[in-house]
Image (cartoon, rainbow, N blue to C red):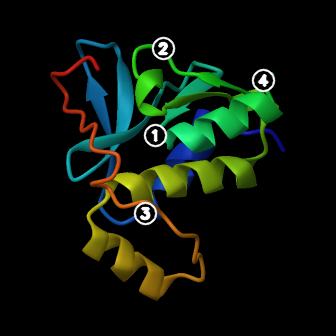
Amino acid sequence: MTATYADALRIVSDLPEAEEVFVAEWGHPTLRVRGKMFASGAPDSPTMSVKASKEEQAELVAARPEAFSVAAYVGRYGWVTINLPGIEVDELRELLVEAWRRTAPKRLVAAYDGTTSDSATSDSAASDSAAYDSTSPR
């Protein structure tokens, strides 16, 4: 089954302190943990963007350019635009959880790891220090 924004919301609802926040200035919602954005999209859009490392961004875009591209505006920080019909829900889950891990405080990630069997490793939120708030169009 191909992924949708509704799938993204279901996935994010399982992540501690993750929430959807509508940004009026941008005209679409963002997905955040403790006020920091880790993904962005919209219910009526076939794409969404997620926070990734520069290395992961390069690998995704090179391997599947039909499904992934460098995100506008924030691509220089590693963000990736996902063509949702081009990926499966399980792959979207992996990308969103990893983006959340990059953004969430280490203690929150450790607590999550203690309650799930998902043991994927992550760079710390500090290593990708491009923090985004609702007023910054970065």
What separation in Å lies between label 4 and label 2 (alpha carbons)? 15 Å
Decide which of 82, 71 is in the foreground and name it: 71
Q: Earlier in the sequence, mark 2 or mark 1?
A: 1
Q: Position of residue 105 (x, y in %)?
A: 26, 64
In the picture shown, does residue 88 fall above or below 115?
above
Return the residue at label 1: 51
In the picture shown, does residue 106 fall above or below 117?
above
What's the mark number on residue 101?
Answer: none
Q: Earlier in the sequence, mark 4 or mark 2?
A: 4
At x 46% / y 85%, what residue is drawn?
Answer: 115
Q: Earlier in the sequence, mark 3 or mark 4?
A: 3
Q: Position of residue 116 (x, y in %)?
A: 53, 81
What separation in Å lies between label 3 and label 1 (alpha carbons)? 15 Å
Q: Position of residue 121 (x, y in %)?
A: 53, 69
Q: Is residue 34 left or right of residue 113?
A: left
At x 40% / y 54%, what residue is drawn?
Answer: 102
Kindly state the secondary structure of the residue where label 3 is placed.
loop
What separation in Å lies between label 2 and label 1 (alpha carbons)? 12 Å
Question: How many residues crowd around disc 2 within 10 Å: few (fewer than 14), some, or many (20 or more)?
Answer: few
Return the residue at label 3: 15
Tell me if residue 6 can be seen. no
Return the residue at label 2: 72
Between marks 3 and 1 in the image, the one whose residue lies nearer the viewer: 1
Decide which of 72, 40 is in the foreground and name it: 72
Residue type, mark 2 in image: Ala
Contact flag, marks 3 and 1 (Cβ < 8 Å)? no
Contact flag, marks 4 and 2 (Cβ < 8 Å)? no
What separation in Å lies between label 3 and label 2 (alpha carbons)? 26 Å
Q: On the rendered image, what quadrant is the C terminus found in? A: top left
Q: Position of residue 31 (x, y in %)?
A: 38, 40
Residue type, mark 4 in image: Pro
What's the mark number on residue 65?
Answer: 4
